[in-house]
Image: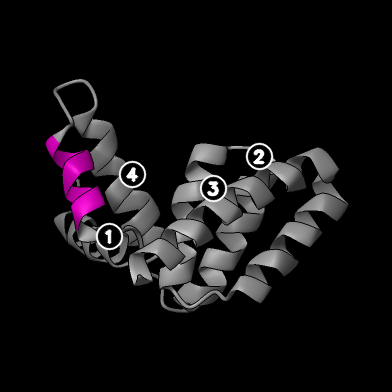
Amino acid sequence: MDKDLFETGLEKRKATLGAEYVQKSLDGADDFSRPFQEAMTAWCWGFGWGDEVIDVKTRSMMNLSMIGALGKMTEWELHCRGAIKNGVTREELRAIIHIIGIYCGVPQALECMRAARKVLDEAEQDKS
């Protein structure tokens, strides 16, 4: 594995998803899952997110659209938190969900809306 890509990926992953979440994922990896965690960190986060051509806010918006289209709601919720951390606003989240509804269907948009509501409510509670 390319150690530079891994280190870049680790930095990018922690910046978006939170250091505690990432460390818990890495610490929870065993001999079976560790190679995937390392490869995903290097490839997705090091190679993909390490490319500075697209800013993190735009990249988060793209991810929400694609993950929403795939219907991967656990990942959508996780990346929704990261998107907010990367500067995506409530209004932008709403617009992304509208586009998901148009291109992927209303039921999928409703799933995204539920997940976004949960994430936004948690963010509000954290501010209190």
Label 4, on which residue? 40
Mark 2, secondary structure of its residue: helix
Residue 94 location, quadrant: bottom right
The location of residue 21, given as percent across then percent down, is 25, 49
Mark 1, secondary structure of its residue: loop
Q: For marks 3 and 4, give the one nearer the viewer.
A: 3
Q: Which residues are magenta?
A: 20-27
Q: Is residue 22 left or right of residue 105?
A: left
Amino acid type, label 3: Trp
Q: What residue sits 12% from the left and 38% below the top?
A: 27
Q: For marks 2 and 1, give the one nearer the viewer.
A: 1
Label 3, on which residue? 76
The location of residue 17, given as percent across then percent down, is 34, 58
Label 1, on which residue? 18
Q: For marks 4 and 2, give the one nearer the viewer.
A: 2
Report how far apart the C-alphas of labels 4 and 2 lie in the structure: 18 Å
The location of residue 49, given as percent across then percent down, is 40, 64
Q: Quadrant of the N terminus?
A: top left
CB within 8 Å, label 2 to label 1: no
